[in-house]
Image (tube, rainbow, N blue to C red):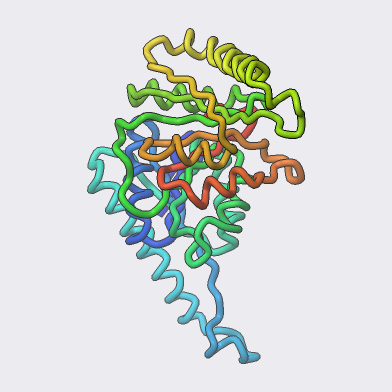
Amino acid sequence: MTSSSSHGRQVTAAVADYVRDQPMLDWATAEAVSRRLPLWLVHAYEWQPGPVWAGRLRSVPDSVLQEAQVAAERQLADAVNECRSIEPGIEIAGSCTEGSVADVLVAASRHAELLVLGSAIEHRHRIGSLVQAVAERSLSPVAIVPAGQLPDRTARVVVGLDLRCDSDSSLAFAFEYAHRRQITLEAVTCWRPDLMDSESMLEPIVAAEQAQVEQRLCDELMPWRQKYPDVEVLASVLERTPVTGLIERADGCGLLVLGRPGSHPVRAMLGSVHLAVLRRATCPVALVPAGQAG
């Protein structure tokens, strides 16, 4: 199942297990409609020999490989039908490819404005090595949608900011998302006083440092408030660790947006905060590479 849309801009969703992927398919379909883009479904599968064939020297019969292909194509067809039932008028197509799942999805990201993954993509590993490998190498922003009931689509979007780093990409993604959905945006940065500095324990010093952080956050948001005057913006400085603060504020939100390093093969590693948030968040999480707006 292929289409010329694979050569244009689109929302791309990775299908792994049609039944468990339904929350992800629902979210990806809504996002494609909101962006007025085609939806492209990708099912990548790696045939693994079972115990019957693993110890044999002779090659696996073509019929066995064909069965694996037929099962994969059935998953893709069911996913396409599910998306059409959600939004009958959506432009949708897809592809079924045998090969390394991570490699196939990274290649698909070249033509995507957004790559959407579901928790089923990890099978027994939850959010782990596969999502990490795809997110670190993807050329487009990646959204990871957890299993279970999705939050209200009108719920606010939360963007987590590290004020020591360039936040333009994640802010552009979050503001554009809030603008399209006509929802509130909350910008969150986490800060704690330096407990190794005896002066930081003095209340006036702590208050002054917090005020500086709040001002830096306001300055960071100012040009985006001007560009998107219709978006209601909240600014929160939390005296929390990043993981605790982000999980706390993301509870009940519609999307959590985080920046990440670009797709450089060495410097694009996700940090401990990203991985911890991905494992604990109950809402969709978008990872936006530096230098891109999504």
Residue nearer the viewer, 103 or 257: 257
Residue nearer the viewer, 216 or 127: 216
Q: Which residue is drawn at 45% across and 30% down?
A: 158
Residue 134 percent location from the top left of the image? 59, 50
Q: Residue at x 30, y 48 (%)?
A: 83
Residue 25 percent location from the top left of the image? 35, 49
Q: In which quarter of the image is residue 239?
A: top right
Give the answer, above or below, for where 177 lies relative to 135: above
Q: How many marks?
A: 0
Residue 202 percent location from the top left of the image? 68, 22
Can you say which quadrant of the picture contains the N terminus?
Answer: bottom left
Q: Can residue 8 be seen in this view?
A: no
Residue nearer the viewer, 216 or 97: 216
Give the answer, above or below, for where 1 lies relative to 228: below
Residue nearer the viewer, 101 or 230: 230
Residue 193 percent location from the top left of the image? 66, 28
Q: Is residue 191 left or right of residue 235?
A: right
Q: Residue at x 26, y 47 (%)?
A: 84
Q: Which residue is drawn at 37% across and 12% down?
A: 230
Q: In this view, does 143 lie to the left or right of 241?
A: left
Q: Can residue 99 be seen in this view?
A: yes
